[in-house]
Amino acid sequence: MSFALDGGIDLKKAILTVLVLVALIGCSTAWPEQVTTWPATMTYPNGYAESNRTFDFEQSVQGNGYFMTYLYAKAGNVAVKNYAHGSGSLNAESTLTYQNLDRSTHYAYSDYNDFAQDCIQFKEDVAMVYAPMRIAVGNGYYAANPLDYSSLLKEKTWVKNYLAGTSMHHEVEYAHALDKELEIVAKDKRNITWDPELESVGYTQMKIVEDVTDGKAHIGVLQANENYLDNSNIAQPDLTNPDTLSQLGMDIKSAWKKPSIEIDEDYWGTYHIEKNMTLEVPYHLIQKKEDWLPCCFGGYLTLPTTYRGDLGLKGAKGVFDCTCFKAPTVAEFPRTYE
């Protein structure tokens, strides 16, 4: 039984690969997706709530055979994905550091403060050399009839910062050898004080130093245009709505139509490549609102238009007219005596 893989795998092969990985490596690691909600969905029994999720991962693998790896991490508005497969020799070391922090203080309305910090850091030092492999699996049919693996090397890595509108992508495929050092840092910090005032910064970095032999290397960078929030369906975000901040950068339909930065590079053959890419996007918004109706300080026509509504609606004046009451000097209904 034989499989020929040039950048792809089929379902039967994937199932058998699980057995091969257990036999060659002896362990497996699964990374569940983390879904972060905005702190305002928490409960505040004492006016304060905090959630701080962290994860540290270190790995070292050396061997010969067939390998397939998958890593995905999402913290708030930042996400990282790394995928690789191939047959031959593998010598790899990698680390992953993850933090997803939400902190909220809701003692009184004027003292509301929500703070969130997300950070993912991924480092990898890997050397792969392609070679066709024959691997016996289990003690049944495939032990007597080893599988032929002939998979050229592939590795795909991307990092996304949704709030900043940043995406970086790197991929190597159909390679006969790959020696690579990779470092990714993705951070997102948001602080909202309920005046309301919003301050945030999205930071994304990817460093690559690699040698590709007889393969294809792709590098791509995309940064949303500077007015992408104004072109979205939340052009004037209401910061008093707890769900708004999670929508910023997540529900933007026009982010990639006219990007501020677009890089698309492909290299076929044998190359030495070095890249150091960093994008930092700060965001600051102050949105003031009147505390309450300014009654008895000039009357209905001096109220902000947001309170007066449509002047064509006569009923609005009857509800919002705050003209001060004046005591009558003459009785409208004279007293009668019997």
Image (cartoon, grey):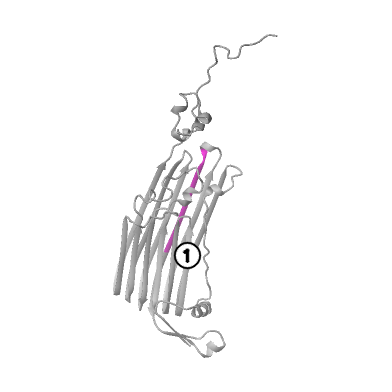
Q: Is residue 319 visible to the viewer in this orientation of the structure?
A: yes
Residue 277 image position (x, y, % from top left): 33, 59
Q: Is residue 20 visible to the viewer in this orientation of the structure?
A: no
Asked if 288 appears above or below 94 in the picture, the reply is above
Residue 24 image position (x, y, % from top left): 50, 79
Q: Residue at x 48, y 28 (%)?
A: 294
Q: Residue at x 46, y 77 (%)?
A: 67
Which of these two is toward me, 140 or 91? 140
Residue at image mark 1? 72
Residue extending farthest top: 337
In reply to whether residue 112 is colored magenta, the answer given is: yes
Which of these two is toward me, 86 or 126? 86
Q: Which residues are magenta?
A: 111-122
Query: Would you say 108 lies left or right of 311 here?
Result: right
Residue extending farthest bottom: 144
Residue 145 image position (x, y, % from top left): 51, 90
Q: Residue at x 56, y 49 (%)?
A: 41
Classify residue 158 by image quadrant.
Answer: bottom left
Which of these two is toward me, 264 or 302? 302
Q: Provide the major secondary structure of the magenta segment.
A: strand
Mark 1 element type: strand
Residue extending farthest right: 338
In reply to whether residue 40 is colored magenta, the answer given is: no
Residue 328 image position (x, y, % from top left): 55, 14
